[in-house]
Image: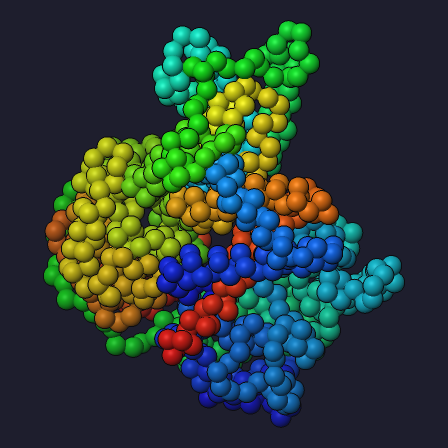
Amino acid sequence: MSTASVPLPGWISYGVIPLLNLILAFFFSGLVVWAIGENPFEALKFLIEGALGRGDAIGFTLFYATSFIFTGLSVAVAFHAGLFNIGSEGQAYVGGLGAALVALSLDHYVPWYVTMPFAVIGAAIFGAAWAFIPAWLQAKRGSHIVITTIMFNFIGAALMVYLLVNVFIVPGKMAPETRTFLAGGQLPKLDWLMALFGLKLGPAPFNVSFIIALVMCYLVWLLIWRTKLGYEMRTLGISPTAAVYAGIPYVRTVIIAMLISGGLAGMMSLNAVMGASARLQVEFVAGAGFVGIAVSLMGRSHPVGIIFAAILFGILYQGGADLSFEMPNITRDMIVVIQGLVIFFAGALEYMLRPAMVRLYQTARGK
Amino acid sequence: MSPHSSANEPAIELVGIDKKFGTVHANKDINLSVAKGSIHGIIGENGAGKSTLMSILYGFYHADAGEIRIQGTPVTIRDSQAAIAVGIGMVHQHFMLVENFTVLENVMLGAEGGQLLAKGVAGARKELKRLETEYGLDVDPDALIEELPVGRQQRVEILKALYRGADILILDEPTGVLTPAEADHLFRILRVLRDQGKTIILITHKLREIMAITDTVSVMRRGEMVATRKTSETTVAELAELMVGRRVLLRVEKGDANPGPVLLSVRNLTVKDGRGVTMVDDVSFDVRAGEIVGIAGVAGNGQSELLEAIAGIRKPVSGEILIDGQPVDSVDPARLRQLGLAHIPEDRHHMGLVLKFEEYENSILGYHRDPRYGRGAMLDLDAVRKDAEEKIAKYDIRPPNARLKTANFSGGNQQKIVVAREIERDPKMLLIGQPTRGVDIGAIEFIHRRIIEMRDAGKAVLLVSVELDEIRSLSDRILVMFAGKVVGEKSSDADEQSLGLMMAGIAA
């Protein structure tokens, strides 16, 4: 019997194995740091302090985590339906257009809390729209969603640059970006939340979209495990033949799953566009869509796991930036290497330790 | 059991081969002797253990006990490399060819002879030429595999084996994918090979082929080698009887059928499979309320496709399916369920169940949109679990745990999950495919009784099974399918022999 099918208790699958993967990742990262002549323990200290040491550090960490939660959920929803959505990056980017259009139209007239629900809807609709064509091509024509979503990332990027340079740019300015939103088009920071813990947020752009992200985690959980649609998506994702037998419509399920996935990716823009920069800029997604793939993998496509994984990647992003500041030898590229190692061990090598754990577990149980 | 046909050492001798997969005893103490330079047929129903035995010979599986002797020398065959080393070549039922490589490249694959190709290619081309002329296996060495018809692809498989120096060729159901003309050509090739001194083992469940081509034939049944005969000294009738077996029937107690109006009709139905091969050819029949119609046939004669077409899973090419006299035009299993058609599929692992789901999740598969399992878009897990637990109790599904992953139930209990789900909906019509495949005796009896109860409750039941005993003990009428057609109808008291002949495509 192959060890992949041996059931392990949840605390091993979701606790011990990810933790060991993480330790391995840090071990090898440490080797890399050591190889370039820096002290790995010192580096780790800078990384942790830079990510969690001060109020504003935590604020930045959670700001990044917010983006990753959205994109992680996006990847996870598609994944449950058996679809590998590589296009969260592009969907988030185009979603930013939706959010920006809402903010630009409403910020003169209403306060932020009126703009916010419309912005959520706008971002989701634009993100979903960007996922629709790959979804339709997959469902109707069998064009592989991995390929089409990757291509749509590029098309989306080109489209956004075109729009920002030619349409939204403020006359007389050099930067390809929209005008700055007024307060009615901005999502306020969560100073009060940090203050509850006696921390000062400082300049960190940690904002209300974090709460939206948590609400989305709950809604995704509800969708996947408590609705008929979620049941159909999971059936299709695990066993396409059983889905046919059960009369689950392939085309409809694929398209709906991708629309939801694209919508969640689009909402990532709330955080970056309305929460942080208060304007739509080129390349504001900055790889969060791709990090979402790793976050979803590491979080086992479960919202709770995704929250933890998103925070971990938030730590790596924020702490990594601080680390390269403190240790100039560790450049931005080195940080990417470390992040890559984490993705490699925590995501891609998910099953590497599993057989060993199964053997250990069985020996421990005396089988 | 197996007589030494000549004084020469047999090409292959199997002594006491035994193999178990978990609780399934696939091969029980098999003894077999294959004479050098002969064509030896091995027949048996699906699941009789033929393929397992050949896989052991080819190193895919390892026997739990027993010995393999090649030309009198005991050998250990660890893998296919070792099999080739002792001169055994295998032609698989599903070809192992690289579609977008040429014939030459495929033949060389794995035997390139060095890091650089050029030398190997030249040598292989020469050798291929020799093999072609020697055995009459004409194939263009530069043709792409994907452009060749199936019959020629098979020849490439044979060439591959010969190129590697095989003296013993095993062919697993070689004619399954061939047209009759291609099959005849294959037989001519096999005769040439035999006359050149090669030994050939032919695995099939087609009696006609056995009679046409083999010198000796061995019959397997339920993991045992039940007989070996000289082909010239046996008859189709005897082989059919040996294959099907004359064991005590597990007869189910049942009264006479009380057929009512026609509920399900099939009219001139034609169905093709994914490759475009016609699997169901102009089939028509009726199923009435309160009767069980059994479809007998050797696996692969179109029963699966027929069942899938009626269940709305496979789109028919032409013909009509009528429920209650109304034609069904949508290919939609969900719609058919609403019309009262339940379906216990042949393949519970890939269709009937999602093995990674917990038991209760599978207990609603296909019926999950039913309002009783939650209003609107939501799924009411409490209601689903309660429902699942009731079925678990009623069908004695073990272990009685609705939260257990379905993969962790035994085959019999998995099948009970499917049966419970489909029968407890109280459908008007029930399609059943291989209801007891891989199911233990106790569960078989239980499932059979449920099926009879459905009939007695006035349901129309269509049963497909490759187990002739099952068909005979459950059915009120038996239709026999062969090569996509219904070749005859029998009552349930028809004798095995005449059914067996019909199943083999020999008119009775």
Q: Foreground: B214 or A192?
A: A192
Residue B452 seen anywhere in this rendered image of the structure: no
Left or right of B233: which side holds A332?
A: right
Q: Foreground: B480 or A78?
A: A78
Which percent across, then down, holds residue B333? 32, 40
Give the residue drawn at x 48%, y 22%.
A274
Give the residue drawn at x 58%, y 82%.
B34
Residue A361 image-quadrant placement: bottom left
Colour convention: rainbow
Give the residue drawn at x 84%, y 60%.
B117
Which percent across, then down, holds residue B449? 18, 62
Task: Give the quadrant of the C terminus of chain B.
Answer: bottom left
Which percent across, then down, holds residue B306? 37, 47
Which percent across, then down, holds residue B379? 25, 40
Q: Is residue A119 above or below residue A71?
A: above
Q: Foreground: A353 or A200?
A: A200
Q: Is residue B136 above or below residue B165?
A: above
Give the residue drawn at x 49%, y 72%.
B52
Residue B130 image-quadrant placement: bottom right
Residue A185 seen anywhere in this rendered image of the structure: yes
